[in-house]
Image (cartoon, helix red, strand yellow):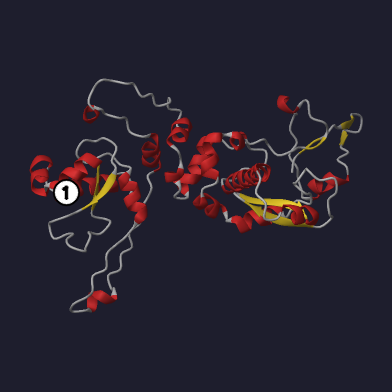
Amino acid sequence: MRALLTPEIAPMSGVVLFRPGSELMSLFRQGRVLIAPQPEHLAGLPAGALPPANQPLEDDELLRAVFENARVIQRAGGIAALDYWLEKRYECQWPHSDWHDHNFTILHHKPASIRVCWGCDNKLRDQYTTRLASIARQNLVSWVLTIVREKLGFDESHALTLPEFCWWLVRNDLGDVIPESVARKAMNLPPEIVVPTISRESETAPSLPATSILQEKVKKVLALKIDPETPESFMLRPKRRRWVNERYTRWVKMQPCACCNQPADDPHHLIGHGQGGIGTKAHDLFVIPLCRAHHDELHANPVAFEQKYGSQLELLIRFLDRALSIGAIG
């Protein structure tokens, strides 16, 4: 809680008095308080409690799909946590009513939840309107930004920036939900401009996507667990277990192609060399990033591919060396 108060000065006795009012007395019962000059941007506000900072990201249309992403909602705490956050409000959010009941409940409406009184809940239940959806979406966005702000250690006076929000997403393994336009904006890169040419599509050389650069900058880490005494290690003929890690293969997919250094499309699992076969697949660790063209070329003729670009084993070792050196594997 913050407050903007007008002091009453008694210069002869060296005393400064404040009149916070009953609603702000709790601020002075918590121990010491910070006193600072009034900032210019607060000059027009009346004395009293200061409202939380406006969050400009609430109005960013580019982030709408991010806020409504199921994984983002779950990482923030889930719909149940949003409902608990809304229960702190003792007002009905449905404005189109002349009378409101003094009891309140939660109305679930796509894409989230709305705080309404019992009377409005009876009228609105099982309905879908754009107005209700707008209120539910506003609640969802405000709640997600509140959670992100608190998780990053900021108080309510801080307005979250786009890079801070993207950092929270990447830190929580949600970097893949960031749209390309948002990633470019967060990294202060110019909008991607597509210049029409008469060249063949195979001759184009697109720039590395900003989302890939963002993932590279934060160096997402894959931690490998070492267990020297697994039960299978004591068996004469142990049943093989395939190592699967979607997080790692998703990261590999966003790296430059091992052949042409253009943005990759697929994490290619090693074939041949004792790996892969009918009904089997190599471990997710044995993957290299390939664009669609080179991936198709490899599967069409592995021998010709390796004669042209080098052995898959060489490409894999080279890629694993890079992943280790930049901290992607820890």
Residue 31 is situated, as x and y percent measured from the top left of the image, at 77, 49
Q: Observer-nearest residue: 32 or 146?
A: 146
Q: Position of residue 196 (x, y in %)?
A: 32, 21
* Quarter where residue 96 is shown: top right
Residue at x 84%, y 55% (from the top left corner): 102
**x 74%, y 57%: residue:** 105
The one of 172 and 57 positioned closer to us in this rendering? 57
The tally of labels here is 1
Please, what secondary structure does the residue beneath circle 1 have? Answer: helix
Q: Is residue 275 left or right of residue 60?
A: left
Residue 145 x/y as whole percent: 60, 44
Q: In the image, what residue type sits under mark 1?
A: His
Q: Residue at point 34% right, 57% down?
A: 245
Going by the image, does 99 lie left or right of 135? Answer: right
Judge from the rendering whether residue 264 lies leftward or rightward of residue 218; answer left or right: left
| In front of the other: 327 or 114 | 114
Q: Is residue 51 above or below residue 11?
A: below
Residue 294, given in percent of the width and then of the height, sits at 19, 41
Q: Residues within 10 Å of mark 1 (few under 14, many from 20)?
A: few
* Residue that carries the numbered disc 1 in the rendered image: 299
Q: State which quarter of the image contains the N terminus.
A: top right
